Amino acid sequence: MLRSIVYFCILLLTWGQPLTAQNLTVATVTRPPFSMVESGGDTGFSMELLEALSKRLNWNYSVSRQEGFSDMLSLVRSGQADLAIANISITAARETEMDFSHPIFESGLQMMVQAEDVREPSLLKALLSWDLAAAIGIAFVLLLGGGMLMWGFERRAQPYFDRPLKEAWFPSFWWALNLVVNGGFEERVPRTPIGRMFGVMLVVSSLFVVSVFVAKITAVMTVDAINGSVNSVNDLYGKRVGTIHGSTAAGFLDRREIDYNSFDGLTELLDAFEAGNIRVVVFDAPILSHYSSHQGSQFGRTVGAVFLKENYGIVFPEGSPLVEDVNRALLALREDGTYDAIYRHWFGSRN
């Protein structure tokens, strides 16, 4: 009889367990657009995903918002927080100390430079450059010289060139210019042997002259576009670069032996960038994109492609029993469209 009562009590406890809401402590850090505070409430992609998970798993949770990323992870390592969520990159080093959920976001690193350092190519600026002016001047001298030489060879054989020196310079220049651009005048073909040889030389050299003009304009526009700016990781050497201490971006810069200024948090990093103390920020692509398109639009522009692709995940203390439940819930949220709806709300449609 006593054994039956014990079994009955165990059955009641087991049956009632899923109906009992779990009370959890969730650590996070301010990282727009993943986790932030607006109108006194927690919001952002990660926080909205957390809310969806809590409804599916019957959680009650309280948010412990930390000043620094390392403080957030320390709460998880010590077991003071049941989990942490923000823009937490899944790395091998962190996996040795904590457990991660399935990926919740695909990200990577990107560069952001001062808005004034981003230069768009300008055709007008290229046309007014000293390099192009010098090229035009040289071409003018060559055409005038070639035309006058042809005048000297042909003035007694070709009626077009039969004129005195003081009147010959412009018709001769005009003849050479038309020869280069249009292939010459059919009715003004050179008649002397040396004139004909020289005319052929001018036609052949015209191909070179035209290609020089095109190449010069292209080169001036390209140089103007990239001068003083950053377009790839290789351009970071010698620049005033900044990132957050202990981040995956810091690890990447260390491996590439790129000198950088290290900051404790995102606020300090962006303050230094806005003050002009650093010219380039290397950090998580979605965070830099959100900053440059919102509150930092007047200060910075993201440049280059996203590199060092990485995934964000939810992190738990090592051996946490919550991991499997969360992974199953994440799969369910993807299957029923909840995850996609949250993603579109914060980032638009995925490619």
Image (cartoon, rainbow, N blue to C red):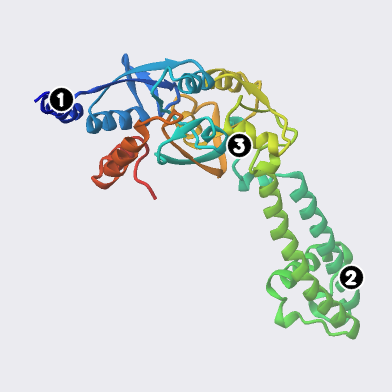
* Residue 71 vertical position relative to residue 3 in the rendered view, above or below: above
- Mark 1 near mark 3, Cβ–Cβ under 8 Å? no
State which tag comes first along the sequence, 3 or 2: 3
* Real-space CA distance between mark 3 and mark 2, rounded to the nearest whole angstrom: 48 Å
Secondary structure type for disc 2: helix
Of tags 3 and 2, the one toward the viewer is 3
Disc 2 crowd, CA 10 A, few/some/many (<14, 14-19, 20+): some
- Residue 167 x, y percent position in the rendering: 83, 64
- Residue 23 x, y percent position in the rendering: 28, 19
Q: Nearer the viewer, residue 48 or 17?
A: 17
Q: Nearer the viewer, residue 340 or 345?
A: 340
Instruction: Please say whether residue 72 is visible from this viewpoint.
Output: yes
The mark found on residue 135 in the picture is none
Task: Give the residue at mark 2.
Answer: 149
Task: Give the residue at mark 1.
Answer: 6
Mark 1 residue type: Val
- Residue 225 x, y percent position in the rendering: 64, 43
In this rendering, the count of numbered labels is 3
Task: Give the residue at mark 3.
Answer: 118
User: What's the residue at 42%, 40% (across, down)?
Assistant: 105
